[in-house]
Amino acid sequence: MEESWRSSSLGYEFAREEEARAAASDLDRRFTEEELSGLRIYRVRWNGNYLVEATFSEGTPEARLEDARALLGESGVPVHPDDLTDYKRATEEGAGLPDWLRRFFGGRS
């Protein structure tokens, strides 16, 4: 049974890029701009998978979020909001490693 987290951002991990792109495309087609305020695909560097992040507006009804979870869950695995934050932070840092660890191995910060 899938655990339901209360968040305006949903993250789902996919093994293949094609699956991630297809799921993101389906979301984009089925939800209005007022409901779906952001949609992004990340490549998870440390395992080669892909992550779809869908951000919904505050006023989006819970039933619509459940629709999105069902659509993404057809071929993706839900990502806990804390893990989603970590994935995004690692992507923003560039190499997927914390700054202190890159400096330890001789990289520039």
Image (cartoon, helix red, strand yellow):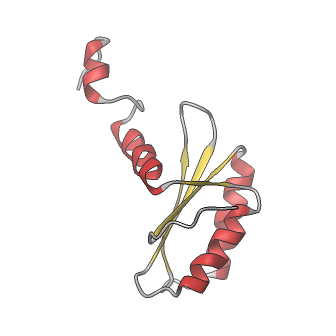
Residue 105 to residue 42: above or below: above
Q: Quadrant of the N terminus?
A: bottom right
How many numbered tags mark residues here? 0
Residue 1 to residue 58: above or below: above
Which residue appears at 46% of the width and 47% of the height?
Answer: 83
The picture places residue 33, in percent across and down from the top left corner, at 51, 83
Residue 63 to residue 103: above or below: below
Which residue appears at 64% of the width and 69% of the height?
Answer: 69
Along the viewing direction, whichever of 95 and 84 lies nearer the viewer:
84
In the displayed structure image, the side of residue 11 where residue 74 appears, left or right? right
Which residue appears at 67% of the width and 81% of the height?
Answer: 30
The picture places residue 66, in percent across and down from the top left corner, at 62, 77
The picture places residue 82, in percent across and down from the top left corner, at 42, 51
Along the viewing direction, whichever of 25 and 98 lies nearer the viewer:
98
Residue 70 to residue 21: above or below: below
Along the viewing direction, whichever of 61 and 16 lies nearer the viewer:
61
Along the viewing direction, whichever of 47 and 81 lies nearer the viewer:
81
The quadrant in which residue 43 appears is top right
Q: Quadrant of the C terminus?
A: top left
In the displayed structure image, the side of residue 68 where residue 7 appears, left or right? left
The picture places residue 88, in percent across and down from the top left corner, at 42, 48
Which residue appears at 56% of the width and 67% of the height?
Answer: 4
